[in-house]
Image (cartoon, rainbow, N blue to C red):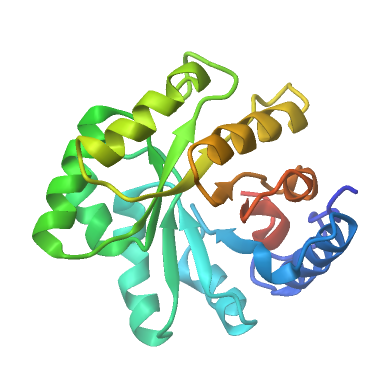
Amino acid sequence: MAPQDPSPMSAHSPNGLAAVERDIARACKEARRDRGSVTLIAVSKTFDAVAITPVIEAGQRIFGENRVQEAKAKWPGLMSAYPGLALHLIGPLQSNKAKEAVALFDAIHSVDRPSICEALAKAIGSQGRRPELFVQINTGEEPQKAGVAPGEADAFIAGCREKYGLSISGLMCIPPVNDAPAPHFALTAKIAARNGLANLSMGMSADFATAIQFGATHVRIGSAIFGTR
């Protein structure tokens, strides 16, 4: 099932959110899953507070951003105005931004190298905040893309836990743009299962229904909600 075409939706209208909610509900029904088992992350990167506010007022409470600095500029005010929001970092994280990321985000989906683990462990220890942590898997082993290679995932997850004392919540993947997504989702789910991880952050506007079929617990949807960037 393809998600509905987001093109007629205004970036300042919650109509896209309603359409996505319907599509998620339908995908869950087809996969024989409870709708409550899938968390919608509305990806608000590049959109300003004026565009985000109607989506909040339509009931969405969990949002995703790619960059720490962009999120710092717009989210503290929104969070003050609308208590109960949660913010997820879904883009790459630099070690020197780990302290700020732990302070601002409720979940970080891009844990992928020892330097990040070390910086996160230090920030978590000093701040006492414990965002949910997802290890990013580079399922296509693309050299230009962040993430842990599938063959190194088990050892990396063990290191996160044993060396750095990090509690890993789940895995995240972004399939190669020209590949069928299903094998990448299946591989990510297999790695998660054998490492005792319950959460799977996978699926975006074009492929979230497929991701739900393969067990996604978090789908990251931007353009289908906010319109094209």
Q: Residue drawn at (28%, 31%), measured in percent from left and top? A: 159
In the rendered image of this protein, does residue 93 appear above or below residue 100?
Answer: above
**Quadrant in which residue 37 is drawn:** bottom right
52 on left or right of 32: left
In the rendered image of this protein, does residue 100 appear above or below residue 182?
Answer: below
145 on left or right of 210: left
119 on left or right of 72: left
* Residue nearer the viewer, 157 or 136: 157
Q: Position of residue 86 (x, y in %)?
A: 43, 70
Q: Residue drawn at (18%, 55%), measured in percent from left and top? A: 124
**Quadrant in which residue 218 is drawn:** bottom right
81 on left or right of 130: right
* Residue nearer the viewer, 93 or 136: 136
Q: Position of residue 162 (x, y in %)?
A: 24, 37
Q: Position of residue 173 (x, y in %)?
A: 56, 36
Q: Position of residue 204 (x, y in %)?
A: 67, 46
Q: Residue drawn at (56%, 69%), measured in percent from left and top? A: 51
Q: Residue drawn at (68%, 50%), measured in percent from left and top? A: 228
